[in-house]
Amino acid sequence: MPFCMAEAGDHACAGQSNAMVTVRRHLERHEVLCMPKNKFQSLYAIERGALKAYQVDASGREHIHGFYFAGEVLGYKAIHMGHYLSTVVALTDTIVCEVPYDQFLELLKVKPELHKHILALISKQLNAGAYVDAVSAEQRIAAFLIDLSLRISGATPMVELTLPMSRQDIGNYLGLTAETVSRVFSRLQQENVIVTDRKLIQIKNPVMLKQMAE
Amino acid sequence: MPFCMAEAGDHACAGQSNAMVTVRRHLERHEVLCMPKNKFQSLYAIERGALKAYQVDASGREHIHGFYFAGEVLGYKAIHMGHYLSTVVALTDTIVCEVPYDQFLELLKVKPELHKHILALISKQLNAGAYVDAVSAEQRIAAFLIDLSLRISGATPMVELTLPMSRQDIGNYLGLTAETVSRVFSRLQQENVIVTDRKLIQIKNPVMLKQMAE
DNA sequence: CGCCGTATTGAGCGCTCTCAAGCTAGGTGG
DNA sequence: CCACCTAGCTTGAGAGCGCTCAATACGGCG
């Protein structure tokens, strides 16, 4: 089984010839991949599906660190602490490819030509979700929808997307309440920027949406 | 001159024996290190001083991505885009060690034992500044002060620190106005949690402060 | 000493949260 | 097949926190 060094829009599989033992795991909706304090041992390349990483704070609020989609790699954040920091659960049926970290390091040693690629991948994650600290709810949500439209389904920006997460999840991620998310969705629909039907979102006016996200 | 692979609280210098050509640059207060769209060529290890990385958006707001202090490395975010994304300026007189990226890659190839260390360093940056999306101004500022007290002066948490940045900078970083920052500082002082005198901050009650940050 | 940038403090407003009441869709059992 | 139930979503009314605008105080520096 190949080591799936997946990247958004670029599912490259490297190291087929190596003795890279990776385990493919099937997760059902709501199934947990890892928990805080679990010892960090592996990165996870997502082949199919969607996950959310979150932490519950003292006051019971669920803070979502991020969503992860097919083609993305999860777990870099845990490297420096030696254990995972979030609970990660599947939002839909999901397949992940478990990559033991010591084998990952071994691969880097054997194939230095991967260094650039890996560093670029991690670098991308450093820039992820910069929009969560935008001022207004509208800006955050517009940016969020654009981000999703780029990530949720490979390379081509989708004008129609199925949200795998609830309004509450979106709110918890963006630092808003589910009510505010719902209200902004309604307003965007009134302004003919999007059309919503439950989990389905159609982006009618991508230009306007981008402008709102600034 | 050694390649300063600096880390907070662990100024390790590796590769003295290599032909690692690094340039040490002196920056005065307000001097610019790099600008958006500048081609990414180097990482910067900070030997002394403090910098801020920011971007000005369409509406003229200055959004600060982060502050960087002695012992930290700057530039990872630029890897995947191939150019810098922020303007980086010195907040005080600062010395940085410029590390050309191709030589950095060369070092990784020659010394695979550094892989773990470097990845842990970058991993740490992935977790940086998680507190900016806390709910209340008080939480953000408390967490900010704790963060600074840990980073600004090496390893030992400082109870007395000199802020290199303005209230406006703090506000721009945390998504607040300078007025709000000022008001919260005043309130914290009234509650005997800190004592402020211009740029000087003494943490009188670290336990309470930590509790406020949640 | 006088200037100017920075910080502090106050008053009023607006956006988002809170609390609460319907509403819709999907699932279950009679 | 339909009544019922539940979870998630939508919509409304009121409250609170932080923003805006504005005035004042402070400090460094010429």
Image: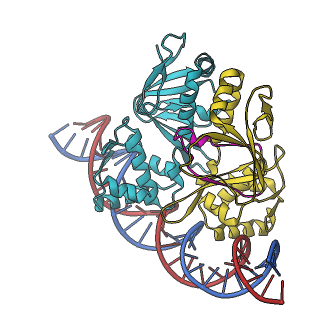
Chain colours: A cyan, B yellow, C red, D blue
Q: Quadrant of residue A186?
A: bottom left
In the displayed structure, A78 sits above or below B194; it is above
Q: Position of residue D5 (x, y in %)?
A: 35, 45
Picture quadrant of residue A189: bottom left
Quick check: can you spot residue B212? no
Residue A88 within the magenta-colored segment of the rendering? no
The image shows residue A78 at horizontal and vertical percentages of 63, 33
Q: Position of residue C1 (x, y in %)?
A: 83, 90
Q: Image height check: is B172 above or below A55? A: below
Residue A207 as seen in the image, left or right of residue B145: left
Foreground: B22 or A46? Answer: B22
Task: From the viewer's perspective, tell me whether residue A182 is left or right of residue A175.
Answer: left
Q: Nearer the viewer, residue A114 or A42?
A: A114
Depicted A158 relative to depicted B196: above or below: above
- Residue D23 is situated, as x and y percent measured from the top left of the image, at 66, 88
Q: Where does the magenta region start and end? A: B71-92
Residue appearing at x 80%, y 29% in the figure: B16
A63 or A208, nearer to the observer: A208
Residue B161 showing in the rendered view: yes
Residue B74 within the segment the image draws in magenta: yes
Picture residue at 53% right of the left edge, 38% below the top = B80
Numbered-mark total? 0
Classify the position of the C terminus of chain A by image quarter. Answer: bottom left
